[in-house]
Amino acid sequence: MDRLKVLVVDDESRMRKLVRDFLVKSNYDVLEAGDGEEALDIFFKQKDIALIVLDVMMPKMDGWQVCREVRAYSKVPIIMLTARSDERDELQGFQLGVDEYISKPFSPKILVARIEAILRRTNQLESSEVLSCGGIQVSKAAHQVLIDGRPVELSYKEFELLVYFMENKGIALSREKILNNVWNYDYFGDARTIDTHVKKLRSKMGEKGDLIKTIWGMGYKLEAEE
């Protein structure tokens, strides 16, 4: 498969190099821009960019405006980076069509994991036929779950929820992100839908249900045990 192109936009050259080095190691082609105007120039010249990593605070044109301009023409996945940790910023990002929102400082390995998860969801990366983690095996094609070799019966949404956790293992996922990706619509209201399904999923998984950790005030994370 051809190497996918990722556009990294940040006015700090050191940050761009850090992200670029990790992405190149993971077999991506990386394009760089130091401000919003340069980012748009590159984006509209290169027709095959698979994903944009976009800083919020930049000279000439900030990340929000870049996102608006891109979204007027394209649904390319966008990950926003920001030094601020403000819920209003995060909500604004999702309303503009941002796929992920990561606060600085962050782990480059986690950033790459999130990029790969998004590209799998948008079918740009070949999805693994079988996902495995900590004794749990999920066959997406056969719609089958095995825990320590024993089959477990899950409802359709429980299965989709487990797949989403496993594709994002080790990553803390907010309830909003889970609803948006598993239920396929934006939803910023009552989170009991998620909590109810997670409770049922944990129960059916037995002892392995403990691998799904509650992140208080945010959401859930599947521990990345191998």
Image (cartoon, grey):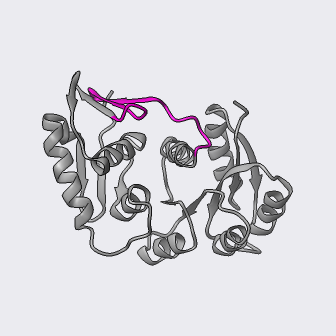
- Please state which of residues 107 and 156 is positioned toward the viewer in this rendering: 156
Q: Position of residue 82 (x, y in %)?
A: 55, 65
Report whether 56 appears left or right of 3: left
In which quadrant is the C terminus drawn? top left
Q: Position of residue 79 (x, y in %)?
A: 57, 58
> Which residue, as the protein is rendered here, is positioned at the far right?
45
Q: Position of residue 9 (x, y in %)?
A: 70, 58
Report whether 51 appears left or right of 196: right
Q: Residue at x 64, y 52 (%)?
A: 15
Total labels: the figure holds 0
Task: Name the magenta segment's main secondary structure.
Answer: loop
In which quadrant is the N terminus drawn? top right
> Which residue, as the protein is rendered here, is positioned at the far top?
149
141 within the magenta span: yes
Look at the picture and state if 135 lies above or below 127. Answer: above
Q: Residue at x 64, y 61 (%)?
A: 54
Look at the picture and state if 69 lies above or below 214. Answer: below
- Please state which of residues 95 and 11 is positioned toward the viewer in this rendering: 95
Q: Position of residue 51 (x, y in %)?
A: 65, 52
Residue 87, image quadrant: bottom left
Residue 36, image quadrant: bottom right
- Please state which of residues 211 and 104 is positioned toward the viewer in this rendering: 211
Q: Residue at x 18, y 41 (%)?
A: 209
Look at the picture and state if 9 lies above or below 23. Answer: below
153 within the magenta span: no
Where does the magenta region start and end?
A: 123-143
Q: Residue at x 25, y 46 (%)?
A: 155
Report whether 214 appears left or right of 183: left
